[in-house]
Amino acid sequence: MKILVINGVNLNMLGIREPDLYGKSDYKALVKSVKSHAKKIGVKVKCFQSNFEGAIVSVIQKAYRRFDGIVINAGAYTHTSIAILDALKAVAIPTVEVHITDINSREEFRKNSYISLYAEKFIAGKGIAGYAAALDYLKEKYGK
């Protein structure tokens, strides 16, 4: 099983940006955690991060017929990007939406998620551990 893990805008600033909200672990630690958990459960994983909406759309499109699942934390694009939503719908790959913080208990504008209109599972507020939960879900439901 191959899973694409996508991190969007500002996720590269983990450990620097609002550590009281997002924790002190940096992006490198997030990737290491994801890869370690993927190995533990026997799935292949590719991690991708971009601050550019078009790059995220392109990596989703390139995932077509190459990946069995997507884990996505689109960052602020969660609340604004119909383009990312449309790309996910186009490739029709099972998707789990992940957020490090609980976006539903934050500012009002963060409660709107375009990604949730497609993603079959939503995981928020579990910190970096939410990514492992997303990988577990995809492995249990679609694992080969």
Image (cartoon, rainbow, N blue to C red):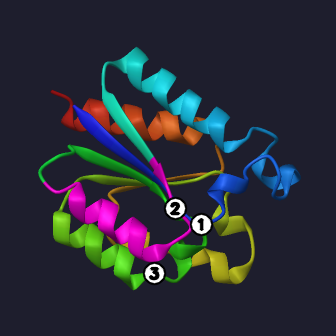
Which is more N-terminal, label 1 or label 2? 1
Q: Residue at x 45, y 81 (%)?
A: 81
Q: Which residue is mark 1?
A: 9
Magenta segment: 48-64
Q: Looking at the image, can residue 9 be seen? A: yes
Q: Residue sitting at 23 percent across and 54 percent down?
A: 63
- Three-letter code, disc 1: Val
Give the Cα distance between marks 1 and 3.
11 Å
Q: Is residue 141 left or right of residue 48?
A: left
**Disc 2 from disc 3: Cα separation:** 14 Å
Residue 142 in the image: x percent, y percent? 20, 37
Q: Secondary structure at mark 1?
A: loop
Residue occupied by mark 3: 81
For marks 1 and 3, the one nearer the N-term is 1
Residue at mark 2: 50
Label 3 packing within 10 angstroms: few (<14), some (14-19), many (20+): some
